[in-house]
Every structure is written in structure tokens, then in C-alpha cells.
Amino acid sequence: MRAFSYDRPDSVDAALRGVANQPGTTTEAAVKFVAGGTNLLDLMKADVMRPDRLVDISRLNLDKIEEVDGGGLRLGALARNSDTAYDARVQARYPMLSKAILAGASAQLRNMATNGGNLLQRTRCYYFYDTGTPCNKREPGTGCGALTGVNRIHAILGASDHCIAVHPSDMCVALAALEAIVRVTGPKGERTIPFADFHRLPGDTPHIDSTLAADELITAIDLPAKGFAEHSTYLKVRDRASYAFALVSVAAALELDGQTIRTARLALGGVAHKPWRDPAAEAELAGKPASLENFREASRVLLRDAKGQSHNAFKIGLAERAIVRALAEAAGVEHP
Ligand SMILES: Cc1cc2nc3c(=O)[nH]c(=O)nc-3n(C[C@H](O)[C@H](O)[C@H](O)COP(=O)(O)OP(=O)(O)OC[C@H]3O[C@@H](n4cnc5c(N)ncnc54)[C@H](O)[C@@H]3O)c2cc1C
């Protein structure tokens, strides 16, 4: 492990001063925040990330879960994943989110992991972790080991010739379906980022994961009032029943008038560089009966541009079946 310096500021202003004057986005920054440390410290030990300085934000007063005007909830960036998942309001009003968080990692990790850190956790692509192989995400311009290598866990949607890595988070898939808002603060003051604009597709700059600037801090994540509590679910398909990342996951949320779908939200995990949403697939369901046939049609629309690599084409059929099953579960429709 390389030498680095370490600060532990006691206020948001001091934390911002710690990362001030860095150009570019947070993934490119030489001075990094550390919260629970469950991702960043692993990456430093593996020599994948090499910050000069860590600014430890774990003691800042950003760990509350609070009501907001209009009926939503504000999840503090430093609230632990387990405290968020077991919060009685989250469980009652956003059960899909609670289920998604609890589908991730292990109890010990969720006790350390924070909400802000979860958003910025990095891909689990083997080539990203293996410093002996090329990886445009780790070392821009070196190539993509996964394209011609083992790519079983990789993207089927939104990939580029430069990167086929996927975003690994479960929590973020539910947040995408809920249309959460990320609240950040930086030298120019506060701003909000709609969840759909927070993560990026790889294009020709796959080393940049998100639109967060290097000198900005996530302070909270706002959940809108609409939580789809009655008809929603999170389904995660993985190689082991626990302690494994998603091959494919689905956050499915419906508003029903009887058996007719008024609104549908669908987000997929494990398939792209960011949680994947597609308005065309959601529009396909609106106004239609909640039936297996209509769920299958929506899954075909959502996956119309899916493209398999040499080892992961199975994900296309898997995603199709997972979407149908998740929508059926959310709607309370019997599924064979
Ligand atoms: C063995 C293992 C299995 C796992 N399995 C899963 C799984 O199945 N599903 C899943 O979703 N996750 C899984 N995880 C990932 C885990 O959820 C993340 O490591 C965790 O959420 C990261 O949170 P943290 O607070 O520890 O982040 P840190 O490691 O402290 O930070 C991660 C990144 O976020 C930045 N950061 C943190 N907080 C802020 C902030 N407030 N503002 C700006 N930048 C910030 C840091 O600079 C860093 O770049 C697993 C992790 C491990 C180690």
C-alpha cells in the first residue's frame, strides 16, 4: 500500500476545504473522501486507487433520516446502509429500497457502508481489480481486458468499445426506480442531481463513473413521496443466495387501478455501467392490464438493444425472465 495523508474534519466546510481546488470529477480526484471505507480501502490495498490524501467524513453530522416537505424522506449520506434498510419509515413507505439494500453485501458490511459511499462504489470487473491487465477504467488508454477475456458478469446494455463493466450496487437500482434526488454541496454551494443523471455510461471516458465533481460532497439522498409501497419489489439473481453481486437485478414498481397499470417503473442492475431505465418499456405498460403477456412485451422492449459478449449472452434471457417475475410479484399476479 502506498503512503497517503489523512485528515478527519469536524464540519462540512472543513471537509470541503480538504478537497478544494481539484479539477474534474470525483473518480479522478487525488484527494478522496472516505466514509465507511468498505470499497475505497479495498481498492487502495489492491493498488487500484492511489489517493494522496484521505478526508475522513465519517464523523460529520450527515447520518440522519428525516421527513421532508411534501411527504418524502431525506437519507443522510452518512446513514449506514443497515440503519437505512431497517428504518421503520423506509420499510413501510419504500419497501423495495429496504429489500434492495438488504440483498447487498453482508450484515457486517452494511453496518459500515454508508449511503453516499454506496452510490460511488466502483465496478467489480475482474480486469479493473487486476493491475496486471489492461483496463480503460483504471488506466485510461490501456484497453479493455474484458472485451476479449472472461466477461460473464459484464454489460449487455449501454456498453462501449472501451468498457463493458457494470455498476455493482443494489441500492442504486431501487433509487433509480424511485427517481431519488442526490443532494450535494461544493465550493459553488448546494445543488441537486436527479438520480438518472448521477451515474454515467462509459462511452470513451469509462474512468469517469459519475457526474459528481472532485470538490463536491454528497450530503443526502431525497426520496420522493411516491414510494410504490403497495406494488413493488426488488429481485436479485446471483450465483449464490447471499454475499454475491447481481448477475441481473430488477426493481419493479407499479401503481394499479384494479388490475390496470396506471404507472410503471422498472430499473435493472448488473446489466450496464449505471442502473438501467428505459421510458419506452415503462410506457409500454401504462394503461394495460397487469398480465404476464404484457410484462413479457415490456421486457422485450426494454431489452431490444441488449447485446451479449462471448460469455454473458445468457444474461439477456435471464433479464427477460427476471423482469416478468418481478413485475408479477409487484402486481400480485400468479407466476408459474
Ligand atoms: C465483499 C463485499 C461484498 C459486497 N457486496 C455488495 C452487494 O452485493 N451489493 C452492493 O450493492 N454492494 C456490495 N458491496 C459494496 C458495498 O455496498 C460498498 O462497499 C459500500 O456501500 C460503500 O460505502 P462506504 O461508505 O464504505 O464507501 P467508501 O469505501 O468509504 O467510499 C466509496 C467511494 O465513495 C466516496 N464517498 C463516500 N461518501 C461520500 C460522500 N458523502 N460524498 C462524496 N463522496 C463520497 C469515496 O471517496 C469513495 O470514492 C460489497 C462490498 C464488499 C467489500
Image (spheres, rainbow, N blue to C red):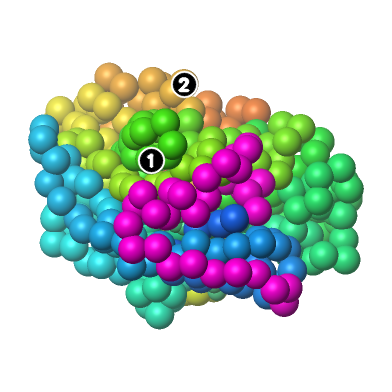
Q: Which numbered dot is residue 280?
A: 2
Percent position of residue 219, x then y? 34, 48
Percent position of residue 218, x then y? 40, 47
As drawn, 10 above or below 141: below
Which residue is nearer to you in this view: 99 or 85?
Answer: 85
Q: Which residue is mark 1?
A: 184
| Residues at circles 1 and 2 in contact by the CB criterion of under 8 Å | no
> Can residue 81 be seen here?
no
Residue 17 part of the magenta-drawn span: yes
> Can residue 137 be seen here?
yes
Q: Residue at x 38, y 66 (%)?
A: 58
Please indicate whether residue 248 sits to the left or right of residue 82 in the image: right
Q: Residue at x 81, y 36 (%)?
A: 161
Percent position of residue 275, x then y? 50, 42
Q: Residue at x 71, y 41 (%)?
A: 206
Please indicate whether residue 129 sits to the left or right of residue 175 in the image: right
Mark 1 and ligand 1: say if the CB distance to the nearest ligand atom is below 8 Å.
yes
Q: Secondary structure at mark 1?
A: strand
As drawn, 13 above or below 132: above
**Which image quarter holds the N terminus?**
bottom right
Q: Secondary structure at mark 2?
A: helix
Please indicate whether residue 256 sits to the left or right of residue 309 in the image: left
Q: What whole-number distance in Å separates the C-alpha atoms at marks 1 and 2?
A: 30 Å
Q: Residue at x 52, y 45 (%)?
A: 20
Extent of the magenta region: 1-30
